[in-house]
């Protein structure tokens, strides 16, 4: 691919200026060819009345375009009437207040390995224009605050590309010799990042949906012929999402057709282009033999997410890319609400919070830390982050918590109605919420404008004489690259008090006896006093994880056991179990690092035994509670990450639990065996999760019968959930004989599924994540395997991403070979797909969290990357900011 040769520059939110020109209509003609593609655009343009410079020249974005002709109002521009420098094309001749700008260019999608703009994926032509890909298709004002009505004509050889798709509604079609053409019209003005087109040999699964207004919408899911049997689940998920959005948010679909296309080569999960969503095949194709329960649930969430964008992102879009969380954070919140309604609310919440604590908190503590509304960036692709998406969702969730469901719905209605068809800001969204609630949310805006994870220390004091209980809060936020001094946040703390007889009524602080409330912590130090408290209570704090903070309270382990049994909040029952295990693991790791050995606290065994013998109705929740905090979360909780000690202690605790609870684990596995036909429904998903959690513990024992059972499950299960769980257990088992059985099962798996890319990606993930010794050698060997292709982002994430991000004990080997391996891959990917290259860098950016001996080796590889000739802006930004910390 051709690299940008201009020096990376920093773009600042404070420097935002309205566009000098607007585009009313965009007419595109795209003639696809085997060697090159010809794109003609006709733009009806006018000067922007809101522009600061009414005499400014026309400056368009243009990247990797071979210009054939440019014209204004039909008169072709001479060579001295425009200048092309870097990514811009400037028209130097004088322009009137309104005019038609026409261009004709040639592009070569077959050579576009960046997967931005128009590119070739196997036998398909497809597009990805968010954030700045449209400038690789035609000269344009490629910014989200320029919205136009698009009409797109696509032509191609009919035999090779029988299906031609674009945004909006199909309005015309025809044939011309061996070629055919179609015209699509989108009546809703949109920015260029929402443009899409697809051409190729595709089959279609078609259905329909009747909106609450009585309109019949045609639903079409396009895939290659081999994948047509994997579309039913996604179609059902789409119909559920459409009905849910009408019911919960009052949002109705607006076009005659809604289309999804599955593509194998895609940088992201999916893209919400108006009426034509393009999906990574991994986010839409599903069948029980090749798709895990977790993947079914992820597909349902992603299908919903992209559909929900039709309003929260398309009808109301971003003014500029600093407002990215306006659409992404809000839509992640909406899809998490949907997922909770479709399954277990508590399990969904636990999974979201675990992701946040393990990965987003780490992002907040690293060199790429940035606010949900960033103040600056070099390359916008680097800001499609967990902070913008997941933390952004948590910020919206806090507004929902503060306002309540009814006022939040009124606020969202006002937001959509007021700004329909506009490109707006985060401030506009919050203003709508403030207006309907009558609240001043100015302090709340710190959540959007300050980076970092706040810390909240909580203490409690019970006065038995006066029967009062005082909660004291102290909040702070550590320095981050953009700021050392942080202003206090408005932190909602959903809470209750637990006593021997259950929930204690809350009296005082304006409360009159309810058992749950939301405290609003607004100062650096603040107290809340409850009266008429009959006994020393155990506080249930941050219910449902009501704020994305690191918080602490001096619970005893007996308090946590009590809370596990007595709390009415499902999330906090899990949190109590998680904190019990976390405290015990911390204690054991500290002892190991000090050269001491201490016994495992038997209270953990007792707690797990109770869960196994009396799981109750929510078995999916029990599976979560029986899972020890992961190594990434344990590391994030330490000042200095001691990889080997964390891994070894966690493994030993799991082995000790397996030995102590062997009989209960075996019984649990048998009790949760699913005998009826497979269905990706909550009850079956919960049973499989609990059974496979039990088997994962049992795989750590020296028990050949259990290993044989796992091998049989790995090669003969009728669904990928059980197959995958057994494979993971075998490849990670230290038991004698496990490695041989794992090797046999992996070979059998590959022979069976070698022609199914999604299954092969799981096969790569399982091996990349195996924590037994020799991980780097295994992964390096797989680079040369026929199953791996470094040009395919899914395979890069499956092998390189999983190994470097999730297999800490093998990646962080003492000689730094893992760091050299990652740096080599980043340099290689830099020349193929800079976005993917930059995203793989994250493990090296956290060098400050590791011991000095490892930090030195990590920094050396970052500097080696920075010395690479032709480094892309994507990789340069991440690497340079990481090294700058030193």
Image (cartoon, rainbow, N blue to C red):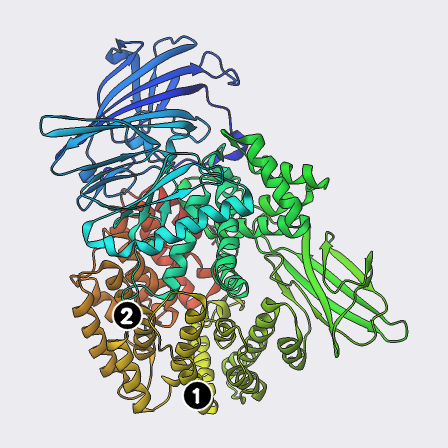
Image position, residue 323 (x, y; %) = 51, 38
The secondary structure type at the circle numbered 2 is helix
Residue 643 vs 659, above or below: the answer is: above
Residue 857 vs 107, above or below: the answer is: below
Image position, residue 575 (x, y; %) = 58, 70
Q: Nearer the viewer, residue 22 or 248?
A: 248
Side of 372 where 539 appears, left or right: right
Quarter of the image where one finds residue 700: bottom left
Mark 1, Cα crowd under 10 Å, few <14 / some 14-19 / many 20+, is: some
Side of 757 where 304 appears, left or right: right
Side of 484 where 366 appears, left or right: left
Q: Nearer the viewer, residue 609 or 15?
A: 609
Q: Determine which residue is flagged by label 2.
A: 767
Q: Residue at x 35, y 75 (%)?
A: 676
Quarter of the image where one finds residue 184: top left
Marks 1 and 2, Cα distance to the nearest angstrom? Answer: 29 Å
Q: Determine which residue is flagged by label 1.
A: 667
Q: Residue at x 19, y 61 (%)?
A: 787
């Amino acid at each position: 691919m051709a690299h940008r040769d201009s020096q990376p520059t920093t773009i600042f939110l404070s420097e935002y200026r309205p566009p000098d020109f607007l585009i009313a209509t965009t007419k595109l003609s795209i003639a696809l060819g085997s060697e090159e593609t010809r794109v003609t655009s006709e733009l009806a343009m006018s000067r922007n009345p809101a522009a600061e410079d009414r005499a400014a020249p026309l400056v368009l974005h243009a990247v990797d375009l071979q210009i054939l002709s440019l014209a204004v109002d039909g008169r072709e521009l001479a060579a001295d009437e425009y200048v092309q420098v870097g990514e811009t094309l400037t028209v130097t001749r004088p322009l009137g207040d309104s005019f038609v700008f026409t261009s004709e260019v040639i592009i070569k999608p077959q050579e576009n390995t960046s997967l931005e703009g128009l590119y070739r994926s196997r036998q398909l032509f497809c597009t990805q224009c968010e954030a700045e890909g449209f400038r690789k298709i035609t000269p344009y004002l490629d910014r989200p605050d320029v919205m136009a009505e698009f009409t797109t004509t696509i032509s191609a050889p009919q035999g090779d590309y029988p299906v031609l798709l674009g945004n909006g509604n199909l309005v015309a079609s025809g044939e011309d010799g061996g070629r055919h053409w179609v015209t699509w019209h989108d009546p809703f003005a949109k920015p260029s990042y929402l443009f899409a087109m697809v051409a190729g040999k595709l089959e279609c699964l078609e259905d329909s949906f009747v909106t609450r207004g009585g309109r019949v919408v045609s639903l079409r899911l396009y895939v290659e012929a081999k994948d047509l049997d994997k579309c039913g689940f996604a179609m059902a998920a789409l119909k559920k999402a459409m009905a849910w959005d009408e019911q919960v948010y009052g949002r109705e679909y607006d076009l005659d057709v809604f289309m999804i296309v599955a593509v194998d080569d895609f940088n992201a999960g999916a893209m919400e282009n108006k009426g034509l969503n393009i999906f990574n095949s991994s986010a839409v194709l599903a069948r029980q033999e090749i798709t895990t329960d977790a993947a079914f649930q992820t597909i349902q969430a992603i299908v919903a997410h992209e559909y929900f964008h039709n309003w929260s992102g398309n009808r109301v879009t971003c003014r500029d890319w600093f407002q990215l969380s306006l659409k992404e954070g809000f839509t992640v919140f909406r899809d998490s609400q949907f997922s909770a309604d479709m399954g277990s609310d508590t399990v969904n919440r636990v999974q979201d919070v675990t992701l946040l604590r393990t990965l987003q908190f780490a992002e907040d503590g690293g060199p790429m830390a940035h606010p949900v509304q960033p103040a600056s960036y070099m390359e916008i692709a680097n800001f499609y982050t967990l902070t913008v998406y997941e933390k952004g969702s948590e910020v919206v969730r806090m507004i929902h918590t503060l306002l309540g469901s009814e006022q939040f719905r009124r606020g969202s209605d006002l937001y959509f109605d007021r700004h329909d068809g506009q490109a707006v800001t985060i401030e506009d969204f919050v203003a709508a919420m403030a207006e309907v609630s009558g609240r001043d949310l100015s302090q709340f805006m710190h959540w959007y404008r300050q980076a970092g994870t706040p810390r909240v220390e909580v203490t409690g004091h019970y006065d038995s004489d006066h029967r009062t209980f005082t909660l004291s809060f102290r909040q702070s936020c550590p320095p981050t690259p953009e700021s050392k001094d942080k202003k206090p946040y408005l932190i909602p703390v959903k809470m209750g008090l637990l006593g021997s007889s259950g929930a204690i009524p809350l009296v005082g602080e304006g409360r009159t006896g309810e058992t749950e409330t939301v405290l609003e912590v607004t100062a650096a130090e603040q107290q809340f006093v409850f009266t008429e408290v009959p006994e020393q209570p155990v506080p249930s704090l941050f219910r449902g994880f009501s704020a994305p903070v690191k918080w602490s309270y001096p619970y005893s382990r007996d308090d946590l056991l009590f809370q596990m049994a007595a709390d009415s909040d499902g999330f906090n029952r899990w949190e109590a179990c998680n904190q019990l295990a976390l405290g015990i693991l911390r204690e054991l790791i500290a002892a190991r690092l000090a050269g001491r050995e201490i016994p495992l606290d038997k209270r953990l065994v007792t707690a797990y035994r109770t869960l196994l013998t009396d799981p109750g109705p929510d078995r999916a929740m029990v599976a979560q509670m029986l899972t020890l905090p992961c190594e990434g979360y344990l590391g994030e909780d330490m000042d200095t990450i001691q990889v080997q000690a964390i891994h070894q202690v966690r493994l030993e605790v799991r082995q000790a639990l397996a030995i102590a609870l062997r009989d209960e684990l075996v019984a649990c596995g048998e009790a949760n065996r699913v005998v009826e036909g497979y269905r990706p429904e909550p009850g079956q998903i919960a049973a499989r999760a609990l059974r496979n959690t039990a088997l994962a513990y049992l795989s750590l024992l020296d028990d050949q019968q259990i290993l044989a059972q796992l091998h049989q499950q790995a090669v003969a299960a009728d669904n990928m959930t059980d197959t995958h769980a057994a494979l993971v257990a075998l490849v990670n088992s230290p038991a004698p004989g496990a490695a041989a059985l794992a090797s046999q099962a992996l070979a059998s798996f590959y022979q069976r599924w070698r022609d199914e890319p999604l299954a092969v990606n799981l096969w790569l993930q399982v091996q990349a994540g195996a924590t037994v010794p020799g991980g780097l050698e295994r992964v390096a060997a797989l680079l040369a395997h026929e199953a791996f292709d470094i040009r395919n982002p899914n395979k890069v994430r499956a092998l390189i991403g999983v190994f470097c991000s999730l297999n800490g004990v093998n990646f962080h080997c003492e000689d730094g070979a893992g760091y050299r391996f990652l740096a080599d891959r980043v340099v290689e990917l830099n020349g193929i797909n800079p976005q993917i290259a930059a995203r793989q860098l994250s493990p090296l950016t956290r060098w400050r969290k590791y011991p000095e001996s490892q930090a030195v080796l990590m920094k050396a590889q970052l500097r080696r990357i920075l010395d690479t000739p032709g480094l892309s802006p994507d990789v340069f930004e991440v690497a340079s900011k990481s090294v700058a910390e030193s």
